[in-house]
Image (cartoon, rainbow, N blue to C red):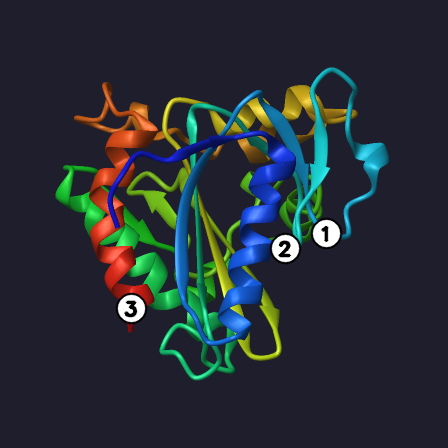
């Protein structure tokens, strides 16, 4: 897949994932890259709207977890596959593995010192961090998400399933600090400790001039091959 990420409003971005999942349910895999303009707060599927402060648009996505700040500095990739595809095993955790490893390998190729989160590491999160992740996705860790070698979270992953089809969602904060989501949450300052353990790609060695379009150029090939099966 080639071409720059599409620039969409938040409602249209959410619709992209829904459409890809519907198409995958009919047997057609698909992939799309997006940056959101203007910036918006995207709430998790079950997150109360009372978590959001006013000031920017607020929308709701179909995947769970807490809020994510989506803007022109964050690359968002939606990858949907039909039932029976290698990226759609019954085990949700196993489904994350090839996606996380493909993104990790691409970033390592850019010179980023990073690794995937182990299952044991994700399961070891304490109750405080789990509670914070229900308000801000970047505050938590899930298996096969990507962290820098110093432990700061760099890439977020999510899944949505329907009749065996799976939508994988990947968020790469390229030039936007993940911790900025706290500015758009009620009592967001209470999440400061958990959000401090995050990083944007532009902070990684050798990636100071990275852009969402440039990162997509690197990810499009390996993720497209995964989607093709």
Disc 3 vs disc 1: which is toward the camera?
3
Q: Examine the rendered structure and indicate whether residue 85 appears above or below residue 68.
A: below
In terms of sequence position, does the residue under pointer 3 or pointer 1 come before the other? 1
Q: Is residue 19 left or right of residue 116?
A: right
* Residue name at image x 16 percent, y 38 percent: 110
| Label drawn at residue 60 | none
Label 1, residues with CA under 10 Å away: few <14, some 14-19, many ≥20 = some
Image position, residue 131 (x, y; %): 71, 47
On the image, numbered disc 3 is attached to which residue? 228
Which residue is farthest right? 50
* Residue 125 visible to the viewer: no
On the image, numbered disc 2 is attached to which residue? 63
On the image, numbered disc 1 is attached to which residue? 45
In terms of sequence position, does the residue under pointer 3 or pointer 2 come before the other? 2
Asked whether the residues under the numbered discs 3 and 2 touch, taking CB atoms below 8 Å apart as contact, a structural biologist would say: no
In terms of sequence position, does the residue under pointer 1 or pointer 2 come before the other? 1
Image position, residue 183 (x, y; %): 66, 19
In the picture, which quadrant includes the C terminus?
bottom left
Disc 3 vs disc 2: which is toward the camera?
3
Asked whether the residues under the numbered discs 1 and 2 touch, taking CB atoms below 8 Å apart as contact, a structural biologist would say: yes
Q: CA distance from mark 1 to mark 2?
A: 5 Å
- In the figure, residue 174 lies in which quadrant? top left
* Residue name at image x 61 percent, y 44 percent: 14
Circle 3 — which element? helix
């Amino acid at each position: 897949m080639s071409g720059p990420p599409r620039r969409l409003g938040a409602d249209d971005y959410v619709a992209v994932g829904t459409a890809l999942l519907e198409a995958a349910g009919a047997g057609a895999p698909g992939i799309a890259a997006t940056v959101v303009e203007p910036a918006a707060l995207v709430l998790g599927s079950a997150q109360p709207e009372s978590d959001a402060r006013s000031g920017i648009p607020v929308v709701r996505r179909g995947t769970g977890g807490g809020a994510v700040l989506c803007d022109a500095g964050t690359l968002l990739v939606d990858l949907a596959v039909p039932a029976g595809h290698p990226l759609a095993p019954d085990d949700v955790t196993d489904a994350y593995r090839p996606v996380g490893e493909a993104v990790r390998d691409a970033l390592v190729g850019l010179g980023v010192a990073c690794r995937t989160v182990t299952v044991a590491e994700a399961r070891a999160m304490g109750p405080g961090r789990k509670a914070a992740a229900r308000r801000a996705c970047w505050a938590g860790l899930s298996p096969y998400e990507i962290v820098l070698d110093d432990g700061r979270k760099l890439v977020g992953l999510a899944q949505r399933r329907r009749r065996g089809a799976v939508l994988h969602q990947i968020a790469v904060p390229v030039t936007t600090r993940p911790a900025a989501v706290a500015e758009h949450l009620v009592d967001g300052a209470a999440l400061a400790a958990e959000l401090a353990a995050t990083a944007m790609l532009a902070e990684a060695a050798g990636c100071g001039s990275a852009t969402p379009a440039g990162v997509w150029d690197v990810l499009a090939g390996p993720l497209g091959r995964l989607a093709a099966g």
